[in-house]
Image: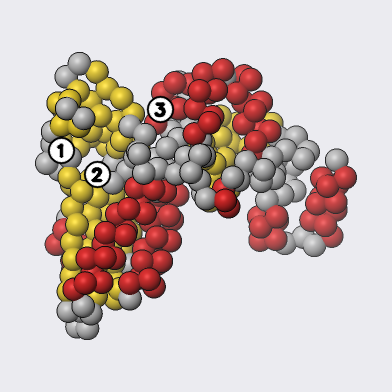
Amino acid sequence: MLIRVTADELDAAEAVASVANPGAGAINVFHGVVRNTNKGRGVSHLVYEAYGAMAEKEMRTIAEEARDRFALIDCAVFHRTGRLEIGETSLLIAVSCAHRVASFEGCHWLVDQIKKRVPVWKKEVWDDGEEWIEGPEALGMQQAPASLR
Amino acid sequence: MANHIRSLRSAESDFHPKRFRRARIVYNGDMTVTILFFASVAEALGLRKLVVPVQPNDTVGTVRDRLTADYPALARFVPNLLYALDEEYVRPSSPIGGGATLALIPPVSGGC
């Protein structure tokens, strides 16, 4: 499993190649991309910050769990940090699997889990200001699992 | 206090670096913890990293409470913070010993 937090551009071909396997009947690739609006406001660009070492650990834990839950053959998870322009990829996931349905489900589950608990933050920068975003899906103390309360 | 003495004694009687790490008690004379700040919290405090003394029987929560007294700007973040000790999520009640790294984790917003 290829797991990476990096300031460099994310390369989908590399992710796909890393999960390729003769037993795979499907390779599913997800790009999380920087959008030009949020809540009706024009976004100029985003800045991502990560607790790099822990983010990679959490991404690996989530990827291992996804592999077991959805019988994935392999998966790659890349997250980018630093300044990202509109249209650039911030999160890249590739999963390989014997059958297509599990590849969609595994990919979807991975994205959701990453948004919940991987220590990465994004700042939205608008023409007239900026703000660190608190992800609506993030585990905060209110909805933290019992093990963290 | 009794707990603290007990953990130090068991650590001394069974000196093995890995055991110390697991017990989160490092008996190397380092009685400080490193605190890491990120994103909104780092900006509000104007601080990314801080080394503070740790006391016997300290938990993540007691260290956080002393820090909040010293840095009142931290208070508004506390209700939504999670905590990581040496890169793993822990409860506020988790014991913390010298040499540890404590990260204050505001609600994450990675992905897309």
Mark 3 closeness class: few <14, some 14–19, many ≥20 residues within 10 Å: many
For mark 2, what is the residue?
A: B112
CA distance for labels 1 and 3: 21 Å
Quadrant, the C terminus of chain A: top right
Callout 2 secondary element: loop
In this rendering, is residue A113 above or below B57? below
Q: Which residue is drawn at the image coordinates 48% and 43% (left, top)?
A: A143
Residue A126's image quarter? Answer: top left
Tell me the amino acid under the disc marked 2. Cys
Residue B67 in sight in this render? yes
Note whether residue A120 is visible: no
Residue topped by disc 3: B40
Q: Position of residue B103 (x, y in %)?
A: 52, 39
Chain to which the residue tagged by mark 2 belongs: B
Name the secondary structure under disc 3.
Answer: helix
The amino acid at mark 1 is Arg
Taking depth in this image into account, of A144 and A55 the one nearest to the observer is A144
